[in-house]
Each structure stands twice: as C-alpha cells, then as structure tokens.
Amino acid sequence: MTTPDLSNVRAPAVQKPHWIRRRRTALVCVAILATISGGLLWRRGPRPDADYRTECRKLSDDSAWGELRLLASEWSEVSVMPDEAYLYLAESQLESGEPLLALETLLKVPAKSPRSFAALITACNLQFGDLNRPLDGVETLKLMIQRKPSSISSHQRLIFFYAVTLQRNLMLAAIDDAIKAQAEPPDAYVYLMLSDHLSFTNGFTKNSEWLRSDPDSEVFQTARIVQLIENVEAAESPTAKAALGKYLETFEELLQKFPQNTVLLRFAIERAVVQFDVEKVGRFVKQLPPGNRDSVLLRQRAWLKFQLDAFDECQELLNQSLSENALDWHTWHELSVCRRRLGEIDGAKQASKIALVGKALRKGLLQMEDASAITGDTLEQFARYAESCGDTRVSSAILTRLHSLGQVPN
C-alpha cells in the first residue's frame, strides 16, 4: 500500500502549552537512549560466566551478601548452566538469615550438574538442622544415594535416622542397600547386630525435636515414648521413676491410637513376655498387621506357641525369624530350647553355641561409646559369627570391607 503524501497538508497553527512541548522532548530523549542502550546490549551480548564467577567469588570473600545476592540472581537468569549461580545465591541467602529461600535455591541446581551433589548435601544439612524438616531430609538422602550410590556418608545418615526412629525393617533394608553398593559405613554392622533391640541415649531427644516438625507423626510419637520409658526405667533417679506411670499411660493411649504399630507392639509384647503374661501376649499378637515379617515379632509369636506347647509351630516361626534376620542371638537361643523339647539334641547344641557367641558379641558392642568406633578385630569376629549363622552375604561384605582397608583377617 502506497503511503499518502501529506507533506503539503498543513496543520492548524495552534500553539501547544510549553509543558506539553517539554514532555514530548523528554519522551523522545528516553526513546533515543533506550534505542542506543538496546543496541549496545545487543552488540555486547550476555556477560561470560567467567566474569560473573570472578565477581561473585570476590563478593563472597568480602562478605558482601546483598551485592552477591543481586549479582548471583542476575547470573542465574542468563547462564545456560546456572548451577554455580544458584550456589552463590544460596550462600547469600543463608548468610542473610533466610535458610528456607536457600533451600529452595539449592534444590534448583540441575541434576546433571557436577555440583548437584554438593547442593544436596547443604540442602540435607538444612533440613535436618535449622529448618527441622527431617522427613524432607530423608527424601533428599534417598535422592543423594540414587545419584551417588557410593556415598558412604549418605547411607550412614539414612541408616541412623531409621535406627533412632526404631524403624527396624527400613533400617535393615537401608543397610542391605549400602552393602550392595559396597558403601556401608562400619557402624552399619553395629546396628545390624543390635537390631533386635534398638535403643539410643539421645533417641528421646532426637524424636522430641523431630516431633515438633510434625506433631501428628506416628513415627516420631511412637519412637519417642518407647525410648522415654526405657530411659526412665534405666534411670536411678526416684523422681524419674515416679513419672513412669504417666509415661506408661501415654504409651497405652498411643497403642489405642495406632493399634497395629509394630514399634509399640514389639515393646508391649516384650514387656508382657518379661512378666510372663501369656494372655496379654496373645492379645497383642492378634493386633499384628496381616503378613507381618518382622523377625522380632516372629520370635515373640514363637514364644507364645512354646508356652502353649505347640513346639512344631514354635520351631517353624523361629526358622522364619532367622530367615529374616539370621544374626539375632536371642532367636538362636529360643531355637535351642525348642529343639531340646522336640528331642533334637544335636540341633539344640548347635543353636546354643551360635547363641552364646552372638550374645557375647552383642554385649561387647553395647559397651562401645560410639558405634562408628568399631575396630577391625570386632568386624572380623562379626564376620565369623555371620558365617556361622549362615549369613554369607554379611560375612563376605565384611571381609571385602576389611580387605579394602588393608586389614587382612587371620
């Protein structure tokens, strides 16, 4: 379309107010500046990552958190791989007292980045630390193990969490995963040997802290009350023992609230066994979830069958228990007693011998102040014990670990 020639058409001679003329001049200037600026930016392009990196490092060294935040944020928007930018941005947010924002930033680091694992470590520390989000922390640990199965520390933290929250089966599965990845921490074998009865001096404190993050959590409520009662019963203080009745009432309330919770039922049945209350054990056994394969609960069910003179059923349940966890010395002891009742003297002697070795080994582990301080000699004893129990998976894994540490067993 041809543009009409309006050059000869004159507008009426109307004088514009001076403020309109100044405004139009200002707008023209702004437009010109914008055009020039845009042209310069177009010719220069985005700044190289190296420039951002150098400036961010300097601002970090100078603790200039406000300026670092602005620059790292700008960098994250223009970089093709903004992983470093996110780490600097998270640092500035952390140092400015905003851990939640830092967490959100850290979780943005792309999985394909070589810095993603370092970002997850910091995120996990925040979730278990300042932010007190332990359940989110567990998911982050699982992600870390998925991305780096060889990370011993990640396996170690996950195993400890399951142990201190008394989630036996999840702990045993986590230990198994670590062994398969050849990334099991030495203390995993301590938890494995003590798995028939997990108890921690800081268990009540830890679960109380984590319960604040989720007051309705079944996991934290149950682990907290069980370890509180055990602490009180082990205490010598008359004041502490005076409060025991109140804590037992809380326990009963939780058992009514969570009638199929295996942490509570294991504890309740064990107390009833000690009191030799067959009727109460039978009542609790009926509450167990269908198809439950917890090795301790299988052993406790076997105890009930033994009291009812059902020795064949007792032995079957004990064998099932050992198939789930062959390292439980207590189960070997119960099997020895049952075999004697069935007239299987040789089998009883064999089971008794295994039980005595396991009991002594467990006693030595309980005297350790720190599970991570387990020695090579103790690991070697554990390997021999596992082999006698028929658990070649564990014995082989321990020997492999000892060889990797340059400790050749005798």
Image (cartoon, rainbow, N blue to C red):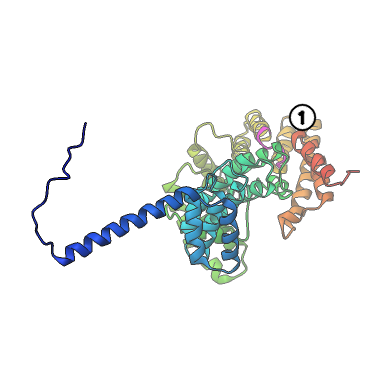
Is residue 272 depicted above or below 351 in this figure?
below
Q: Circle 1 — which element?
A: loop
Relative side of 342 to 409, left or right? left
* Closer to us: 368 or 337: 368
Q: Which residue is mark 1?
A: 344
Tell me the kind of residue under disc 1.
Glu
**Which residue reaches farthest right?**
410
* Closer to us: 297 or 272: 297
Q: Position of residue 381 (x, y in %)?
A: 82, 45
Q: Position of residue 369 (x, y in %)?
A: 72, 60
Relative side of 407 to 306, left or right? right
**Which residue reaches farthest front?**
8
Q: Which residues are magenta?
A: 323-328
Q: Position of residue 196 (x, y in %)?
A: 65, 45
Q: Residue at x 73, y 32 (%)?
A: 339
Q: Looking at the image, can residue 132 be seen?
A: no
Crowdedness near tag 1: few (<14), some (14–19) or many (≥20) residues, C-alpha within 10 Å: few
Asked which quadrant contains residue 316, the reply is top right
Q: Residue at x 16, y 43 (%)?
A: 6
Does residue 327 belong to the magenta stretch?
A: yes
Is residue 74 depicted above or below 293 in this figure?
below
Q: Position of residue 15 (x, y in %)?
A: 11, 62
